[in-house]
Image (cartoon, rainbow, N blue to C red):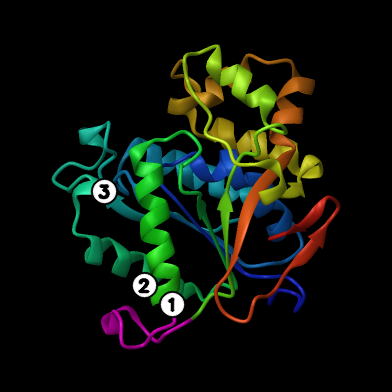
Amino acid sequence: MSAPASLPSVLAVYAHPDDESLVAGGTLARLAAAGARTAVVTATWAPDSPRAAELADALRILGAGEPRMLGYADLRVPGSAPGRARFRDAPLDETVEAVVAHIRSFRPDIVLSHDASGSSGHPDHVHTHRVTLLAAHAAGNGDLHPDAGPPWQPRALYLSAHPREASSELSALLAGAGKRLYTVPDHLATAVDVHPWVERKWAAVLAHRSEAARHPSLPSLLAGLPVAARERILGTEWFLRFGLGSGGPRVSGPRGAGPG
């Protein structure tokens, strides 16, 4: 079934299995429920690893198709992709071309990814931001990466972010576990209200069973909260928007003009 003309197709590119569910799961579920095409590219972990199976379960919950895994090693878990380079150590042209190939094959209107800080400062998040930014620009230029398929230019890039004041509850939760949340000024971020899809989003987060069981991962910290507090944190997703092509489409949501 083709998506309604008013709905953008969305390709999300994130560093690790579970990133897509934590920062964009509600947006992906909301768009899929409305009939939009959605998909997720994951930079790290091998396609035959246990976390790949968890990712497949999460994407089924979100309606985002099958995993698209680049298969590089997680910087902090060398065994995540035996025999493969760590994502940050792989040649830049190679990683950019891999993402360009997914953009050109899926042909999205919008690309989602991490912001420049990666929210947590994790080097894999930051590098995924850089690679995706380069790939989103290169995908529309047929002179670049000609072996990656016919050119396709996404119209906008939405970067997952956390506004400073609006994310104070999440910041406090992470600080209590000795972690830091990197934030942006509130006026820069666009809010997407995903409260109607928060149960599906949380189910997708919990599908990443190994992360949910690992303390103090964010899924494990969220699992320890009362339901109301957890849903306050997960019920809004925030993005920084950058136009790439003709500047569209922007579908208005209850709390702003976000990607869903």
Residue 117 in the image: above or below residue 225: below
Q: Position of residue 74 (x, y in %)?
A: 29, 39
**Magenta highlight: main SS:** loop
Q: Position of residue 205 (x, y in %)?
A: 57, 34
Query: Residues in magenta?
Result: 140-152
The residue lying at 44 percent from left, 82 percent from top is 140
Q: Viewed as shown, does residue 77 lie left or right of 165?
A: left
Q: Position of residue 151 (x, y in %)?
A: 42, 85
Q: Position of residue 136 (x, y in %)?
A: 45, 69
The earlier-in-sequence mark between 3 and 2 is: 3
Residue 188 in the image: above or below residue 218: below
Residue 200 in the image: above or below residue 151: above
Specify the quadrant of the image occupied by residue 186: top right
Of helix, strand and loop, which one carries label 3? helix
The residue at which mark 1 appears reads as: 104
Residue type, numbered disc 1 = Arg
Contact between labelled residues 1 and 2, with CB atoms less than 8 Å apart: yes
The residue at which mark 3 appears reads as: 87
Residue type, numbered disc 2 = Ala
Of helix, strand and loop, which one carries label 1? helix
Q: Viewed as shown, does residue 83 lie left or right of 225?
A: left
Q: CA distance from mark 2 to mark 1?
A: 5 Å
In the rendered image, which quarter contains the C terminus?
A: bottom right
